[in-house]
Amino acid sequence: MSNTSKPVTRSSTPLRKRRAPAVALIGTNEQERRSLLERAKAALENMTDEEDAVITAAARTDPDAQPNLIARRGRPRLDHAKVAILLRLDPDVVESFKKSGSGWQTRMNAALRQAAKLD
């Protein structure tokens, strides 16, 4: 058996500009693509926790898959997150809270909770 294969060379195109090959969909028509998508969705819905754990464990060992499995950055979400609203207040009320220094919004929230008898 002769070795007539060409040597492997790197592409001069940067990775971010290369298109990912659509191997699974080459040569398929629209009906076949829909069928493939429906089968994939059904397989995902029918996946057991054990199968998911095996797939996740395998993905964690794959260095190319690591960015997708890294925990989200930032502050964790709260169970009872606060709601952002637009509220018009008298300027002297806002200035009074702002003069008390950092954390004035938290103190204003506490004053509103006390006035609404929520605490």
Image (cartoon, rainbow, N blue to C red):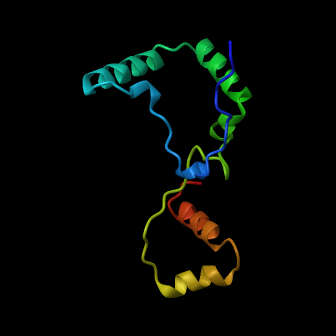
Q: Position of residue 46 (x, y in %)?
A: 46, 13
In the rendered view, tell whether residue 89 sits above or below residue 31. Answer: below
Q: Is residue 3 left or right of residue 88?
A: right
Q: What is the quadrant of residue 103 in the picture?
A: bottom right
Furthest residue in direction left, as rendered: 31
Position in image of residue 77 (x %, y %): 61, 47
Q: Is residue 100 left or right of residue 18?
A: right
Point 62% across, 12% down: residue: 50
Residue 57 image offset from top left, x and y in percent: 70, 22
User: How far from the left and from the top, in percent, is residue 44?
Assistant: 47, 20
Q: Is residue 34 left or right of residue 9?
A: left
The residue lying at 69 percent from left, 21 percent from top is 3
Vertical comparison of 7 with 16: above or below: above
Question: How many marks are shown on the rendered structure?
Answer: 0
Residue visible at 65% across and 24% down?
Answer: 4
Image quarter hosting the N terminus: top right
Look at the picture and state if 95 lies above or below 84: below
Name the one closer to the observer, 95 or 51.
51
Residue name at image x 37 percent, y 24 percent = 37
Question: Is 109 left or right of 27, judged from the image as shown?
Answer: right
The part of the image, by quadrant, that contains residue 40 is top left
State the residue in front, 41 or 32. Answer: 32
The one nearer the camera, 1 or 12, is 1
Closer to us: 82 or 74: 74
Look at the image and tell me in which quarter the C terminus lies. Answer: bottom right
